[in-house]
Image (tube, rainbow, N blue to C red):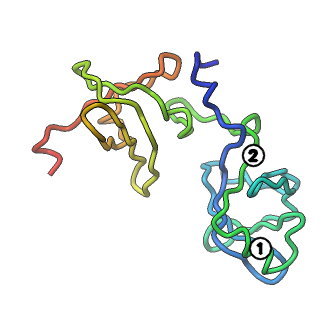
Amino acid sequence: MNSGRQQGAPALVRIGFVRRAVGLKGEVEVEPLTDVPDRFARGLTVSVDGVERVVESVRQSRGGVAIKLTGIDDTVAAAGLRGRYVQVPLAQAQPLSEGHYYHWQLVGLAVTDAAGRRLGHVHDVVAYPANDVYVVRGETGETLIPALESVVKRIDLDAGSMVVELPAEEEVR
């Protein structure tokens, strides 16, 4: 267990984002927020907007996966889920490989640069197609740190810390 870090662990972990209703029978197109391709399986219990539902069927769609959930039986009900997250209990979260972290594990980490200067704490993690960006807030303001191996030198969840090596100012332009 990570000393202190688990206290901020969410009860539910997001595994998908509902993009839109699909068809007439209540399917929704979900953008997976996981690298595990078969994460959405028939019989999986998920939470959407605070309501537990069971995945009745799954198929690939052009924007991700199309799933049918119990209790969502028409286009109107499916459209009502647009913009919501599909979540599972933390205990069902897939373990990540070495060097990969859930966003909630990083929020709150103390960030210092390679010289030991305090930059602040990770306030948020923003996902972009190329790479995530850590939003660090401290006494000197906000710093955006790309989640790249060349920049992030060490993450220690047990110690609650992250060490980064920021590019020189002239390289940032």
Residue type for callout 2: Val
Identify the residue at image location x=76%, y=39%. 92
Quarter-wise, where is residue 91 in the image? top right
Residue type for callout 1: Ala
Identify the residue at image location x=28%, y=31%. 139
- The image position of residue 47, as x and y in percent, is 78, 52
Instruction: Using the image, determine if residue 23 lies above or below residue 166.
Output: below
Residue under label 2: 88
Q: Which mark is residue 78?
A: 1
Instruction: Using the image, determine if residue 66 lies above or below residue 13.
Output: below
Instruction: Using the image, determine if residue 148 lies above or below residue 43.
Output: above
Instruction: Using the image, determine if residue 150 lies above or below residue 46.
Output: above
Disc 1 is placed on an element classified as: helix
**In-front residue for pair 43/104:** 104
- The image position of residue 9, as x and y in percent, is 64, 32
- The image position of residue 114, as x and y in percent, is 25, 23
**In-front residue for pair 156/138:** 138
- The image position of residue 113, as x and y in percent, is 27, 26
